[in-house]
Amino acid sequence: MSCIILSLFVLISVCIVLNAFAPMNKVATNYVGTKSSTIVMDGKTRVLRDRMKSVKNTRRITEAMRLVAAARVRRAQDAVLKTRPLIAQLQLVR
C-alpha cells in the first residue's frame, strides 16, 4: 500500500512540475501516435512527453556548454601559468 501511494505521489509531482513549465494557452487535443496508428493518446500525455524531451535536450545542451566553458577556463589558466616565468624575469630587470 505504501509503495502504491509513493508511486502515485511521484507521478503527480512530476506532472505538476512539468505542467508548471507548460504554456498556458496550449489546448489539449486527441492525437494519433506516429509510431503506431492504433494508439490514441490524449493531448496531455503528448504534451508531457514533448516537455520531458525538451527538458532532456536542454539539459544536454547545458552540459555541453558547461564543458566548453571549463575547457576555455583551463586554457586561460594554462596561458597565465606560462607567462609567470616571463613576469618573474621582468621583475628581476627592474
Image: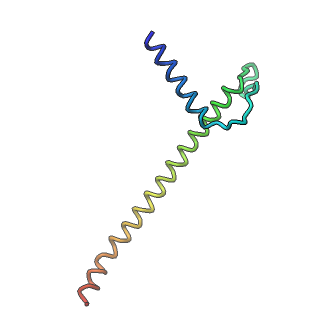
Q: In which quarter of the image is the C terminus?
A: bottom left
Position of residue 45 measured from the top left corner of the image (x, y, whole percent): 66, 26
| Residue at position x 42%, y 62% in the image | 73
Q: How is the image coloured?
A: rainbow
Position of residue 59 measured from the top left corner of the image (x, y, whole percent): 53, 43
| Residue at position x 48%, y 15% in the image | 5
Position of residue 81 measured from the top left corner of the image (x, y, whole percent): 32, 70
In the image: residue 23, left or right of residue 32: left
Q: Is residue 27 above or below residue 79?
A: above
Q: Which of 37 and 24 is in front in this view?
A: 24
Residue sticking out furthest to the top? 1
In the image: residue 72, left or right of residue 94: right
Residue sticking out furthest to the left? 92
Q: Is residue 24 above or below residue 84?
A: above
Q: Quadrant of the N terminus?
A: top left
Residue sticking out furthest to the bottom? 94
Position of residue 33 measured from the top left corner of the image (x, y, whole percent): 73, 26
Q: Nearer the viewer, residue 29 or 60?
A: 29
Q: How many marks?
A: 0
Residue 39: image quadrant is top right
Q: Nearer the viewer, residue 18 or 79?
A: 18
Q: Is residue 13 above or below residue 1?
A: below
Q: Which of 2 and 78 is in front in this view?
A: 2
Q: In this view, does 60 lie above or below 24?
A: below
In the image: residue 34, left or right of residue 94: right
Residue 79: image quadrant is bottom left
| Residue at position x 56%, y 39% in the image | 56
| Residue at position x 54%, y 23% in the image | 11
